[in-house]
Image: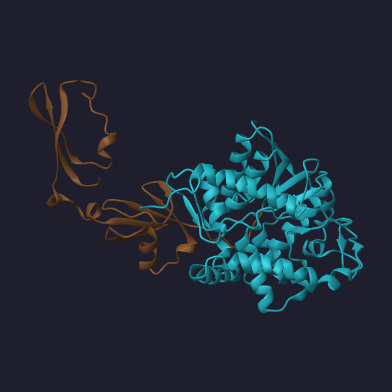
Chain colours: A brown, B cyan
Amino acid sequence: MGARVDIRYRVLGIRVVLKQGNIQYPISSIQYPYSHSQFVELQSVHVNHAKMTTQEKTVLVTLRKQRWQVEPGKTARQVIQSLDLNPENYLTMVNGQLTDDSVRLKAGDHLKLVAVISGGAHAA
Amino acid sequence: MPRKCRKCQRPAVINMRQHKLALCADHFQEWVVNQTERFIKKYRMFTHDDRVLVAVSGGKDSLALWDVLLQLGYQVDGLYLGLGIDGGFGYSDESRAMCQAFAEKHPETTLHVLDIPTTYGESIPEMAARTRRGKGKPCSVCGLVKRHEMNRIAHDLGYHVLATGHNLDDEVAVLFQNTLNWQVGYLARQAPVLPESPGFARKVKPFCRFYERETATYAIVRGIDYVYDECPFAEGATTIYYKELLNRLEADKPGAKLHFYLAFLKARETLFAHWQEEHVELHPCENCGQPTSAPGLCTFCRLLPEEVRPRVRHAQPIMVKSML
């Protein structure tokens, strides 16, 4: 996900490139125009790492207006700690989904930190 | 592998290390509702016969509390006090909009709104700037106005109970501060329930045993829109500093905050038994009639300019009925 890919399909025996470019969603969720055709079969998915942008190779971390690019492969909790932040102070959302901080982050993921500490006013 | 929900093995949205419990979105919502009901009964906060007024700020805690109490079938309405705080992004306007949006989604409840600047001619920052109480920050004036007005409105509208969204992090930060300063009087009064007395509504904190991250998680998984930005005057607040300090402890010792609070609640039963028997004579305020420790005017009425004081006796909130 987030990588630059070529998806090749065979339609009626003719090899075609159905989708080229930057795919930002799981391949299994892509709705293809020929998805109900018995003549369509997935032939290959080629990921071209050389064409990947920095954002596609790394994990984007955001906290309010702050942004960081970090290496993939760490858990959300490890990433928070590596930024010198306390995991107790934040919730973690990965690609828009609230998740426990043990989730391991992949290249292209967006980790959004939601601050939970509020102060003082409770009936503002 | 990411953690799984203990009940259904789906991906967990939260891991509560102090309880050694990871839950998915559905089971976490269920857990919060059940635990809230348990705390309400354990501390004898209120029953289904009581009319409950929830003080709502548009933040995660108070809106989540309103939502849970509605799910539990209590007779509950909301009270929003407009403080006239802008902070460059219309803080009070946004807070009110969040409360109204919530009320509109729940036809079984009512939102009462009292706008302080409209009612008394000044916003909270303006009141603070005019008086000695508000040197530097209006938080002291803000607390005073809210306590007075919430109690007055609850009484005037016939609510038995005033509920606030204070969570365990709020309680522990205040406990820590009062312990550092040995504020014995404040320590003696800190409890999940402050019983009613003549002129004072019963005050309850049904979320007092939930961590702040749990109330935030609940608000998110329930799809409750809340004001994410902090009150502009909260920056640098001592409470926030203590919360961060205590969270450092929590990160190393999971459950430290919960233990500190629960052990305190147990200890206060014996530590402050004598203090509770002491009787402070209260007098009705000459202007508003609310009990006050010194004869004459209460602190709130003293805060107001003389020509504005009569308004306190008649000021009523606007009722924002749902689905209007």
Residue projecting furthest to the bottom: B181
| x and y percentages locating residue B296 in the rendered image | 90, 66
Camera-nearest residue between B6 and B55: B6
* Nearer to us in this view, B123 or A46: A46
Across and down, in percent, residue B10 comes to 43, 44
Can the viewer see residue B225 in this picture? no
Q: Residue furthest left?
A: A14
The total number of labels drawn is 0
On-image quarter of the N terminus of chain A = top left
Q: Is residue A67 left or right of residue B191?
A: left
Q: Quadrant of residue B209?
A: bottom right
Q: Percent from the top left, x then y, of residue B265?
A: 72, 66
Vertical position of residue A20 compared to residue B294: above or below = above
Up-down: is B311 above or below A20?
below
Q: Quadrant of residue B295?
A: bottom right
The residue located at (64%, 62%) in the rendering is B125
Looking at the image, residue A1 sits to the left or right of residue B233; the answer is left
Which quadrant holds the C terminus of chain A? bottom right
Tell me if I can see residue B41 in this picture: yes
Residue A26 in the image, given as x and y percentages of width and height: 28, 40
Residue found 72% across the figure and 57% down from its top: B146
Q: Is residue B50 above or below residue B276?
A: above
Q: Residue at x 54, y 66 (%)?
A: B235
Q: Residue at x 52, y 50 (%)?
A: B217
